[in-house]
Image (cartoon, grey):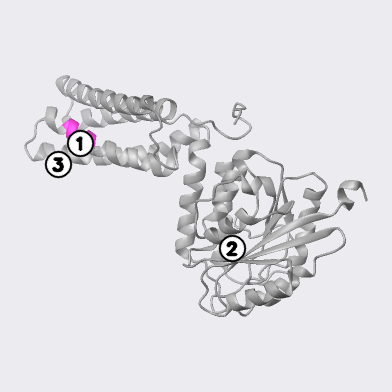
Amino acid sequence: MNKKESKVVKLSIVIPCYNEERTLKRCVEKVMEIRDISLTLEIIIVDDASKDKSLTIARGLEKQYYEVVVLTHNKNSGKGAALRTGFHKVTGDFVAVQDADLEYDPRELKKLLLPLIKDEADVVFGSRFLSSEAHRVLYFWHYLGNRFLTFLSNMFTDLNLTDMETCYKVFRREIIQSIKIDEDRFGIEPEIVAKVAHMRPRIFEIGISYFGRTYEEGKKIGFKDAVRAIYCIFRYNAYRVPWPIQFFIYLFIGGFAATVNFLLFVVLLRAGVGIITAAPIAFIIAAFFNYFLCIKLLFRHRAKWNSLSEVLFFLFIVCFIGAFDLITTNALFQLGLLPEISKIIATILGLIFNFSGRRYLIFPEPSSGPWAPQVKQ
């Protein structure tokens, strides 16, 4: 055993807890069993405003074990919020997450720690799908959903994970504490994977066992969390992927806005409004939808007007594309094309200019992945 393996390290384990009175005590006891002469523990239980006896049990464990620290929320906020609170307080060399429901075996945390202790990895994920260990057989659609979400996440992060939604993620403390966590519920899983991927640390994946719960036994994740996970994959990744992929996404966003643009133009035209008036009205309303979807899904997490040049660039692009849309539509109509055909051609050309202006002038962001230029943070 070399020096890096034999030195004493401290592992901080954050346990988010909401109504887990049946398993919390046993969970902490199992976690405590992994202590040895080279591994010390810090166990942070974050009670997320439980309605059962979870907090009372947690307080008892805090008195029983000096390694245990209990933090509380006055209002139930979700797993992501609980982890955000816990990560802020950790002091160990490495940080892990342990759900209180014991779907994951704490003994396997030692296995996940090895690449970190050997200084071969900065982040280690435990994979339920990369293992010959015991697995409880449960829901087919959950399995399929996890596979789909992992595949979608990998497309955007350029990672080749097998289990993005895994609870068992172990980090060097400086890695996880440098990440600003925004998600309050289960969206924290794709958010963390995305933000870790953008940092490009050394990531390992190791197979683990899994003892899942049924909904009758207290499982909390549901369909709306899957929908949120898809949104989070877009939200935390799309603004960093290479421009060809961004343009592909923008085709959907721009296509929706273009459809709004075209339909409004036709409605106004049928209502007797002239082309010179109908075209800019339809364009301005569609531009609002386009910009909103760009902010929410593609280029930015939040709209932050942090400089006058950014505001001026945005206004310039809107005015330029608006004028281009009007001039092109009218010019094509004057050449003998139908108004609807003229509008479709102008809209398609506008999509290309719109994307280019937003990508390179309004929201210039460095791409991630091996194809991206190395940008100093």
Q: What residue is shown at x 69% (from left), y 61% (from top)?
A: 13
Name, please, the residue furthest toward the left.
272
Give the number of the disc on residue 269: none
Q: Amino acid at mark 2?
A: Tyr
Q: In the figure, residue 306 lies in which quadrant? A: top left
Q: Does 280 sit above or below residue 221?
A: above
Q: Amino acid at mark 3?
A: Val
Q: Which residue is mark 2?
A: 143
Q: Earlier in the sequence, mark 2 or mark 3?
A: 2
Number of marks drawn? 3
On whether residue 338 falls in the magenta region, the answer is no
> Which structural element holds mark 2?
helix
Give the number of the disc on residue 282: 1
Q: Which residue is mark 3?
A: 267
Q: Nearer the viewer, residue 183 or 142?
A: 183
Local packing at callout 2 (Cα closer than 10 Å; few below 14, some 14-19, many 20+) is few
Badge 2 vs badge 3, beta-carbon distance below 8 Å: no
Q: What residue is shown at x 73% (from left), y 52% (from top)?
A: 94
Please report the bounds of the magenta region as a residue range: 279-284
Callout in the foreground (1, 2): 1
Q: What residue is shown at x 56% (from left), y 48% (from top)?
A: 153
Residue 158 in sight: no
Q: Amino acid at mark 1?
A: Ala
Question: Distance of mark 3 from mark 1, alpha carbons?
Answer: 9 Å
